[in-house]
Amino acid sequence: MITVNEYFDGAVKSLAYEHNGKSTVGVIDAGEYEFGTSTHETMIVVEGAMEVLLFGQSEWKTFSAGEKFEIDSNSSFKVKVTGQVSYLCKYK
Amino acid sequence: MITVNEYFDGAVKSLAYEHNGKSTVGVIDAGEYEFGTSTHETMIVVEGAMEVLLFGQSEWKTFSAGEKFEIDSNSSFKVKVTGQVSYLCKYK
């Protein structure tokens, strides 16, 4: 079963599946978003680049294809993208 | 705009977007499928592994996360997966 998820009026869409735990691959439209986490997440940029502001940090960091960052459970992070970006997210 | 595509009664789903040309990220359920191409495609495995039989070849080859293969336009390829697999596809 592959589940389609949509957020921010379709500006972010993802496909949820199982591979050694829950995973999603998704696409983010140009814009700025804030995501909340209920479990620990590892975000891996598949294509494109995203600027990320992790909770409690004051500096935005840029992550490009192949690079990853981690977010604690019950936390949040902001993402800014100037063009469509795809990602893989692993949930613990 | 992010377009959701579904094939084989939902056993394959993809999200289409633009990044230096058309791209899709998608997920394939366990099973065997044959895909046709209208343009040249580069398939990159994001997570998991897939066995692939390219048109005109007699041997299946296995591609794992990070590995890629190319398919000519107006051709076809078969894919066998034993668990859910995600991929990135680039269209020329």
Image: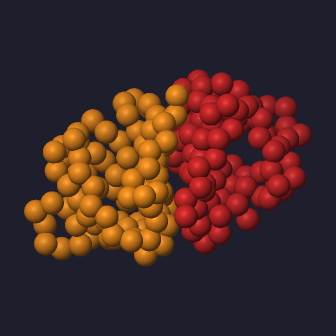
Chain colours: A orange, B red
Relative vertical location of residue A66 with respect to residue A50 in this rendering, above or below: above
* A89 on left or right of A75: right
Q: Position of residue A66 (x, y in %)?
A: 43, 58
Total labels: the figure holds 0
At 45% from the left and 61% from the top, the residue drawn is A11
Quarter of the image where the C terminus of chain B is located: bottom right
Relative vertical location of residue B36 with respect to residue A20 in this rendering, above or below: below
Q: Position of residue B45 (x, y in %)?
A: 57, 45
* B38 on left or right of B49: right
* A48 on left or right of B49: left
Q: Position of residue A36 (x, y in %)?
A: 23, 51
* Residue B64 in sight here: no
At 27% from the left and 35% from the top, the residue drawn is A92
Q: Residue furthest front?
A: A9
At 27% from the left and 61% from the top, the residue drawn is A34
Among the 4 quarters of the image, the one containing residue A59: bottom left
* B15 on left or right of B69: left
Q: Position of residue B70 (x, y in %)?
A: 73, 52
Among the 4 quarters of the image, the one containing residue B51: top right
* Residue B92 in sight here: yes
Quarter of the image where the N terminus of chain B is located: bottom right
Q: Residue furthest left?
A: A56
